[in-house]
Amino acid sequence: MRASILAGLLMTTCSVASADLIQYSRGAGSFGGNGASFDGISTSYDTGTQILTWEVDNARKNGALMDGFWLVLNDGPSNPKGGDGLAIFYADFVNHGGSDNTGLWVFEYNGQNNPSSYQSHEYFGNFSSGLIDSGDIRGFELDVSSIYSQLATDAPYDDQIGIWFHPTWGTLTGVDNTGQLDSWWYRSQGWYDAAGRDTTRVSEPSVLMLFGLGFLGLRLTRKKGM
């Protein structure tokens, strides 16, 4: 009887506490516009922790690794370019000296076909600690809960994803005295645009669920030994 009650409580806990990892990836290809290539693009979003990850593997032009980008995501089926209620991510990986800085800045996207959102729209912060710069892989990993709580969309994507991604080379950025991005320049750019691409969803056991499983096993073991 006790085992049945515990199992019922555990099932209720699992249904509340479980989360999904939503993923999208594609293999090697070329960027539009400048002949640059990449070995892979991948992104994931955890609905429980609200961690968004974006990674690009070996994005190179004439042997040089991309040193910056801007990115807008949505849940499809349209390309995010021109959309409303979205976030735009700006990344600069290399400090070239002078007044430029490395960083990851997030703003509300202004819906225009250019990277000018930082000049006029809501600023969510500099999250430079979230940058990923490991070998040929560059991107970010970031808790986006504070960002999407202020936007019309409550998550970057869902069962589908739309992508507006522009890698840059020769990226030069400047910030004001608070660390906010206030200038953005680059020598060359490419693009990867996608709309209505299906994602994959994997259910994840939560820490609470795993604790519940251990507790249930312990109770059943004790009862059997009595």
Image: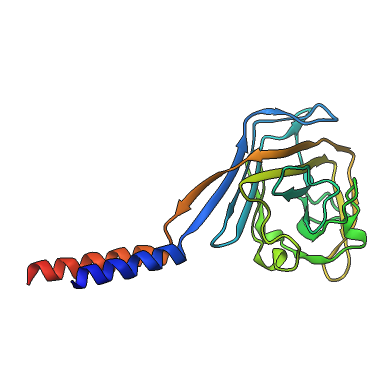
Q: Say whether residue 34 is left or right of residue 65.
A: right
Which quarter of the figure has residue 61?
top right
Q: Is residue 34 above or below residue 12?
A: above
On the question of residue 99 being in view, the answer is: no
Q: Residue at x 25, y 67 (%)?
A: 216
Residue 137 x/y as whole percent:
64, 41
Which quarter of the figure has residue 142?
bottom right
Q: Is residue 134 above or below residue 131?
A: above
* Scheme of colours in the image: rainbow
Q: Residue at x 77, y 59 (%)?
A: 106
Q: Is residue 210 above or below residue 92?
A: below
Closer to us: 97 or 165: 165
Closer to us: 14 or 221: 14
Quarter of the image with the N terminus is bottom left
Furthest toward the left, the residue is 226
Q: Say whether residue 38 is left or right of residue 218.
A: right
Closer to us: 134 or 127: 127
Which quarter of the figure has residue 105?
bottom right
Residue 166 x/y as whole percent:
80, 41
